[in-house]
Image (spheres, rainbow, N blue to C red):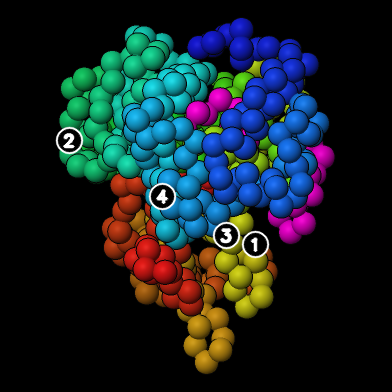
């Protein structure tokens, strides 16, 4: 069995809870003393730090939302003097104005250890060569896995995203055994290797650690086949540090949350009520060890389920299911809830590639719903009537899955733009909010 920090990762649950309680009491005091907007929230609810004596008191604390962080941009939630910080990162801005997160050296070390746990859980050791093809820079993906790879002692290839020719050249020439990037970029690399006549068993990769965006089990299988690897999921968000908040072990039955550093709760997104283990709801995190940007009860807007069921890998940390989209990823089209992940599931089941785009608009007060799907070369060579037949059967499959029927358009191979980072799956013309609009508010 592979562990980076075995003693911690296999700690009895009662000890995890005791440790979390001790850390929570200390962290609440730190936040109350140093983060003015959070102190205000606690005062409004009439909660004092001494009311929090352990994790059972957590529900007494107020939530923090992404909008709270946006309102306090850039430094309102910073809990230490700037001179104690060594770095910032920022969210990808997928859903609006960016949030800036600060790190002390201690914060960086713990974050990198979390990423190291993920690499080792996926079978990595200091004999591996890790190709980091997540973006470097403000995005947390590149730096997080880079630091984790160093901690494991792997040879690290700091490729960043993009420049596919160079990615493939270095992968082959330096014998990369691990690939770390977004699942959509992994799929693109698989496609690019095939185009260059390199079969899955000719590349040196054995595993991949993919995250930062939602991806389905079907997408996992498709990546595993095209790259000839085992694909592992990793989850995280800038507000809690970055990737490595949770990661998959060899069992691949959900991601273990690093509970020595984070408390996870599931709440009803409508009422804020804490739901019992096994319920589907919004994931909420409390960071127990972060010094610079320690968020208490941060609402991720990611929807998932937690499970304390024993895992045969030996880890005792609670597991979360793959978040199959965020609550704000959900499209409401003609009154029906639609998640992009449902569309991806249908496409891959029906033998299409994960290259698609959803376009929603409003014409004469009615929602229009179109899905563009790429054909492969063989389909593209078909007769027009065969292509029309395929579109019809795909529309029927979509209607069965979603409850409403989109217009499906099969398009030429390579006509949908590939993403080097997070894929842009949805173009919702009904409510375009851009970064600059947020910043100009
Ligand atoms: P932004 O919120 O602007 O995208 P981040 O880059 O910090 O900023 O992204 C964090 C978000 O990415 C998470 O809240 C989650 O929605 C998504 N995410 C990260 N990892 C995964 C994963 N493995 N599966 C699904 N979604 C993920
Ligand atoms: Zn496990």
Numbered disc in front, either 3 or 1: 3
Residue designated by label 2: 166
Residue designated by label 3: 328
Mark 2 or 3 closer to N-term?
2
Q: Secondary structure at mark 2?
A: helix
Q: Secondary structure at mark 4?
A: loop
Magenta span main SS:
loop
Q: Are marks 2 and 1 in contact (CB under 8 Å)?
A: no
Q: Tag on residue 74?
A: 4
Q: Secondary structure at mark 1?
A: helix
Numbered disc in front, either 4 or 2: 4
Residue 186, horizontal then vertical, whole percent: 37, 39
Residue furthest out toward the bottom: 364
Picture residue at 28% right of the left edge, 20% below the top: 156
Q: Is residue 23 above or below residue 193?
A: above
Q: Which residues are magenta?
A: 268-292
Label 3 lies in ligand 1 vicinity (Cβ under 8 Å)? no
3D distance between C-alphas at marks 1 and 4? 42 Å
Residue 131, horizontal then vertical, whole percent: 30, 27
Picture residue at 54% right of the left edge, 57% below the top: 67
The answer, for residue 218, to whether it is visible in the render is no
Mark 2 or 1 closer to N-term?
2
3D distance between C-alphas at marks 2 and 3? 36 Å
Q: Are marks 4 and 2 in contact (CB under 8 Å)?
A: no
């Amino acid at each position: 069995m592979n562990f980076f920090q075995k003693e911690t990762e296999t700690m009895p649950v009662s000890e995890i809870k005791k440790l979390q309680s001790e850390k929570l009491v200390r962290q609440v005091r730190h936040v109350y003393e140093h983060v003015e907007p959070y102190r205000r929230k606690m005062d409004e609810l009439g909660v004092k730090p001494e009311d929090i004596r352990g994790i059972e008191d957590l529900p007494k604390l107020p939530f923090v939302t992404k909008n709270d962080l946006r309102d306090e941009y850039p430094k309102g939630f910073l809990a230490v003097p700037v001179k104690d910080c060594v770095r910032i990162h920022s969210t990808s801005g997928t859903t609006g104005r960016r949030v800036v997160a600060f790190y002390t050296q201690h914060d960086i070390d713990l974050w990198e250890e979390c990423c190291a746990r993920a690499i080792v859980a996926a079978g990595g050791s200091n004999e591996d060569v890790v190709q980091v093809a997540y973006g470097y820079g403000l995005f947390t993906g590149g730096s997080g896995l880079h630091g984790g790879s160093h901690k494991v002692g792997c040879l690290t290839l700091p490729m960043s995203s993009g420049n596919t020719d160079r990615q493939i050249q270095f992968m082959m020439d330096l014998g990369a055994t691990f690939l770390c990037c977004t699942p959509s970029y992994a799929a693109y690399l698989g496609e690019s290797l095939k185009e260059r006549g390199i079969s899955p068993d000719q590349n040196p990769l054995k595993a991949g650690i993919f995250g930062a965006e939602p991806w389905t089990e079907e997408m996992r299988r498709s990546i595993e086949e095209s790259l000839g690897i085992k694909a592992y999921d990793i989850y995280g968000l800038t507000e809690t540090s970055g990737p490595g908040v949770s990661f998959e072990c060899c069992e691949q039955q959900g991601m273990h949350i690093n509970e020595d550093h984070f408390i996870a709760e599931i709440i009803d997104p409508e009422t804020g009520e804490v739901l019992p283990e096994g319920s589907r709801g919004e994931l909420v995190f409390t960071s127990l060890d972060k010094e610079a940007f320690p968020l208490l009860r941060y609402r991720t807007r990611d929807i998932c389920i937690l499970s304390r069921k024993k895992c045969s890998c030996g880890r005792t940390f609670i597991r979360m299911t793959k978040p199959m989209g965020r609550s704000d990823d959900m499209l409401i089209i003609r009154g029906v809830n639609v998640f992009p992940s449902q569309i991806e599931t249908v496409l891959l089941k029906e033998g299409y590639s994960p290259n698609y785009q959803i376009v929603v608009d409003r014409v004469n007060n009615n929602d229009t719903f179109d899905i563009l799907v790429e054909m492969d070369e063989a389909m593209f060579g078909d007769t027009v009537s065969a292509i029309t037949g395929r579109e019809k059967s795909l529309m029927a499959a979509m209607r069965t899955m979603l409850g409403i029927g989109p217009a499906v358009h099969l398009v030429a191979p390579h006509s949908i733009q590939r993403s080097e980072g997070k894929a842009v799956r949805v173009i919702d013309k009904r409510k375009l909010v851009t970064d600059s609009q947020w910043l100009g508010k």
